[in-house]
Image (spheres, rainbow, N blue to C red):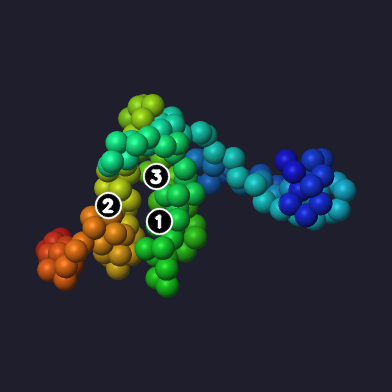
């Protein structure tokens, strides 16, 4: 692993921990050249390597892109970074269970909304408004009505 401070590739692992669900391993490392400590994460590569977009395009699955959309929806909400990371890990586990080499972007979007609904209703509505492309206030009201009916 390359040190983010000096670029040296020689380091030693100080501590290793597995996440609560065992989906990733967190390692604290120390650079042998400059002594700086940093953290790395290891996770199993997602089975589905391609995402089929609504417009027919295909693109490689990108965890950071999924996390970015969730982070925007959760901005200024009482949702921790760990909760967001856990949400992404759960979705990846669901995708891995399918065993497909390609996953539909609609499946990913629906899974994000389902997990966000349970995590934070405001973040859910924010994400849904972009994902479902709400064009009017009535679309917001309709979605809020559905949310209120399920509470």
What percent of the width, then of the height, locates residue 113? 29, 53
- Mark 1 to mark 2: distance in Å? 14 Å
Foreground pick, 114 / 72: 72
Q: Which residue is mark 2?
A: 114
- Secondary element under disc 2, as helix, strand or loop, is helix
| Sequence order check, earlier mark of 3 and 1 | 1
What percent of the width, then of the height, locates residue 137? 16, 71
Residue at horizontal 76 percent and vertical 48 percent from the top: 3
Q: Which mark is residue 111?
A: none
Rendered position, 85 above or below 48:
below
Residues at marks 1 and 2 touching, judged by CB atoms closer than 8 Å: no
Q: Which residue is mark 3?
A: 90
- Secondary element under disc 1, as helix, strand or loop, is helix
What percent of the width, then of the height, locates residue 145? 12, 66
| Sequence order check, earlier mark of 1 and 2 | 1
Q: Which residue is mark 1?
A: 69
Foreground pick, 61 / 16: 61
Rendered position, 81 above or below 39:
below
């Amino acid at each position: 692993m390359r040190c983010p401070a000096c670029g040296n590739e020689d380091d030693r692992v100080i501590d290793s921990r597995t996440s609560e669900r065992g989906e990733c391993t967190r390692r604290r490392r120390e650079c042998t050249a400059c002594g700086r400590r940093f953290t790395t994460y290891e996770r199993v590569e997602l089975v589905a390597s391609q995402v089929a977009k609504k417009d027919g395009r295909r693109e490689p699955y990108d965890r950071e892109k999924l996390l970015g959309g969730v982070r925007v929806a959760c901005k200024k909400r009482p949702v921790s970074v760990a909760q967001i990371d856990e949400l992404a890990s759960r979705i990846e586990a669901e995708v891995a269970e399918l065993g497909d080499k390609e996953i539909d972007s609609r499946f990913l979007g629906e899974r994000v909304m389902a997990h966000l609904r349970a995590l934070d209703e405001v973040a859910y509505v924010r994400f849904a408004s972009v994902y479902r492309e709400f064009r009017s206030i009535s679309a917001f009201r309709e979605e809020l009505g559905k949310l209120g009916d399920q509470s």
